[in-house]
Image: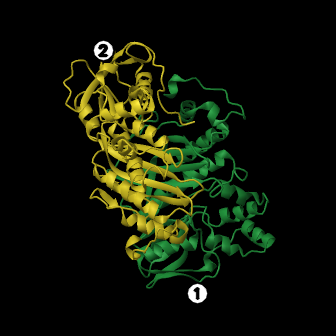
Chain colours: A green, B yellow
Amino acid sequence: MSSSRPPVSLTPATTLADLGEFGLIAELTRRFPQGEQVLLGPGDDAAVVTMPDERVVVSTDLVVEGRHFRRDWASAADVGHRVAAQNLSDLNAMGGRATALTVGLAAPPDLPAQWLLELADGMAEEAAEVGASIVGGDVTSSDQLVIAVTALGVVDGDPVTRAGARPGDVVALAGRQGWAAGGLAVLTRGFRSPRALVEAYRRPQPPYGAGAEAAGLGATALIDVSDGLLADLGHLAEASGVAVDVATASFDIPEPLLAVGAALGADPLGFILGGGDDHPLAATFPAGSALGPAWTVIGSVAEGTGVTVDGAPYEGPTGHRHF
Amino acid sequence: MSSSRPPVSLTPATTLADLGEFGLIAELTRRFPQGEQVLLGPGDDAAVVTMPDERVVVSTDLVVEGRHFRRDWASAADVGHRVAAQNLSDLNAMGGRATALTVGLAAPPDLPAQWLLELADGMAEEAAEVGASIVGGDVTSSDQLVIAVTALGVVDGDPVTRAGARPGDVVALAGRQGWAAGGLAVLTRGFRSPRALVEAYRRPQPPYGAGAEAAGLGATALIDVSDGLLADLGHLAEASGVAVDVATASFDIPEPLLAVGAALGADPLGFILGGGDDHPLAATFPAGSALGPAWTVIGSVAEGTGVTVDGAPYEGPTGHRHF
């Protein structure tokens, strides 16, 4: 469909209503390069993708303006990176990798078209980091901006669930943790620095590939940290029927978090234990496993239930609730 | 996750906020039976589904309250049937069939929980009609109710796109057309009958399996009618680079549509040519193809562009625009 329409000239004042549904679809499609795994991309009733394995891994996430992002806190491209990263991370957390994404956009008719196209650019760039293509989707009008992303992909070995942790295992983390929460705390208070934290909030850097690495290293359970470190370790503990203890001495608190903690009068450890927007992976491994440099051991698994910090219940905020 | 939580007692006054995110997920999951193709269902970072073919067909649709449905016009279960049917129909329109759905729900915290659970029941029932399972999704809060559905599936032969129609082909239709538009016209004016049309709007009956049948019969192009018959034939004509003419004499206008046309002073043919919520399939076949009883020839393909009715431009409404 896109090939039959010439590119349109957009000004900052051009709205989605000006562009129209089919103009918007054509402009979006132009922004989504299709990899060789895509047999049929956007524009038909459905897309067709070749999967290298009969086991397909699939995950869907929704983000809502005002709840998951604010247009004055992040650029459209940033939001695009974030919403794609969130889904790509879900497949990373199964030990898999994404090959295709679909995108559903419900947006107010008066939204600047340029914003949505820059969002699309950001999503396509993030997808390209793992070799995935955006193969289709849907656009419609709504009062509130809602972005629904579905990621499809494969696992090379067996998928690693949340449910396999065993007493005696170690808990390890790959990727940054607490940076995005620090950035959000800064933005919430009207500041824009430390820039490294604000950037971490705007564009998370999930450790793509660490999930497949964990599977290869014999991980017994795997989860991505999206609700908050302790909250997500709680999900892992509940699914596995075990207790998890986190050792705070294992965290090397980065300088920007120390600075923000001092400036805001907050315990910087709170960002690490409660934050959820960095999308690192938490995994459990048999004790004594040889882990690569991507992984830091942060705790241990025991018989029981629940999550403790340094052997005691944690009193701070542990994560995000959606209702 | 669901197995560890006992069912909760809901009253009509129980809201999503009362139930909470994880309570809601547990109750939803309980309503989604998992077929044997599902290796890992809801509750982990992603679901895992076995696909019988390396080519995976995928489609995403969004529906928004107030735009695509009204809670006073259809029950929650009806809306569930409709939103699932819409996606299952997209795969039907490739000559394929769905094996798995994911669902993203963005909903106001004060929405009655019972409404969302009955929506889930309706979706699961509709998915079961083609043997598909609802394998995962996401829930979050929003101001406006938005439902995002993604369907994954397979085609047995080669997928049939919109782009293969050739001059000389016949155009044929499988499934009811115009009934839902008649029902919507009735509801819009505050009436509830003819009941058959209102029911058709509330629960479309797409001709599941007709897509695969069309592929087997040698269809050159295939599309589902979701925007409006003439609008969707226009998409097919544009993608194929051909002109389509529709012969109105080929339609046997059903009695309820004649009755509604008379009561509202409207041409009943308008519901058939402009309506879009029944999800029949329109296909093109080489002239002389032996078609089964599911198919009615309604027109022909010629060189040129655009869609005509009885050889002339059509002056009535031709479909739905989303912006």
State the SS at label 1. Answer: loop
Give the residue pinned by disc 1. Answer: A312
3D distance between C-alphas at marks 2 and 1: 77 Å
The residue lying at 21 percent from left, 18 percent from top is: B288
Tell me which corner region of the image, top left, top right, bottom left or bottom right, holds residue A207: bottom right
Tell me which corner region of the image, top left, top right, bottom left or bottom right, holds residue B281: top left
Q: Which quadrant would the N terminus of chain B be assigned to in this image?
A: bottom left
Query: x and y percent of residue B54 in the render?
Result: 32, 44
Query: x and y percent of residue A273 in the render?
Result: 62, 73
The type of residue carrying mark 1 is Ala
Of the pair B267 and A233, the residue shown nearer to us:
B267
Relative vertical location of residue A100 with respect to residue B318 in this rendering, above or below: below
The residue lying at 55 percent from left, 72 percent from top is: A231
State the SS at label 2. Answer: loop
Give the residue pinned by disc 2. Answer: B168
Observer able to see residue A208: no
